[in-house]
Amino acid sequence: MQILLVAATFTELMPLIGRMHAQGEAGQRLKSGQINNHFVDVLMTGVGTVATTYQLTRQLSAKKYDLVFNLGICGSFDRTLSLGDVVHITSDCFADLGAEDGENFLSVFDLNLIGTNENPFTRKLLLNENFPASPVLNGLPRLNGITVNTVSGNDATITTLQKRYQAQTESMEGAAFFYTCMLEKIPCAQIRAISNYVERRNRDAWQMGLAIKNLNEHALLLLENIRP
């Protein structure tokens, strides 16, 4: 199978890249190799929705893939989840795309700029129902995520986002990944490991190393067991 792995940075996937039977680099942002007879490309998009949308669209236009996976770290609103937990995000949205009207936030759907169920949205959300069958995915908690351009670190902002979206995780790329893959009709999945809780910025409390370790272990297991 031809599989594309998408990450904001190579750092998040270095352990997996080290396990690939390398076939060289196809560019500054792309590494190619083989895992369990699958031909695997690893695309480093850069951080944020704009970079992710551009680089992913560019790569999907250049090569046809059977499956695409977004692998990365994330923050968690849910304190019942442990740092280092690996989760399967099946719902995402552009949480800060819209307009402010005093104390109120108006989404692009509220502004009638996008229809509630306009492709690829379903009830204002990017719902991924086209992920591959996999025992590894089946074993992961399925959660709702939000995607933001500014990582939340203000108590009022965090409370507002929790009330508005009832999401468990926050990232800077997930919705852009879903948006692109859904429009291109490519089976995909978003898998993340929790590196920190969404709170006032406190890098000392983050568990980046643990999150990256667990993420890569699950990603490798996924690639070793997935079938066409």
Image: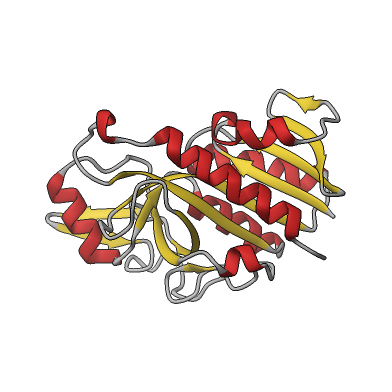
Q: Position of residue 195 (x, y in %)?
A: 38, 42
> Would residue 169 appear left or right of 200 to someone viewing this image?
right
In the foreground, 145 or 55: 145
Q: Nearer the viewer, residue 70 or 185?
A: 70
Above or below for 118 versus 213: below
**Image quadrant in which the N terminus is located:** bottom right
| Quadrant hosting residue 161 | bottom left
The residue shown at (60%, 36%) is 13
Residue 70 at least partly seen? no
Point out residue 96 in the picture as x, y percentages from the top left corner.
Answer: 33, 52
Place residue 6 in its image quadrant: top right
**Is 209 or 99 nearer to us in this picture?**
209
Label total for image: 0
Q: Residue at x 42, y 52 (%)?
A: 85
Does residue 194 appear anywhere in the picture? Answer: yes
Which residue is the extreme one toward the top? 28
- Decide: is 105 above or below 173: below
Percent x, y of residue 142: 47, 67
Instruction: Judge whether 83 appears above or below 139 on screen.
Output: above
Q: Residue at x 55, y 29 (%)?
A: 11
- Which part of the image, by quadrant, shows the C terminus? bottom right
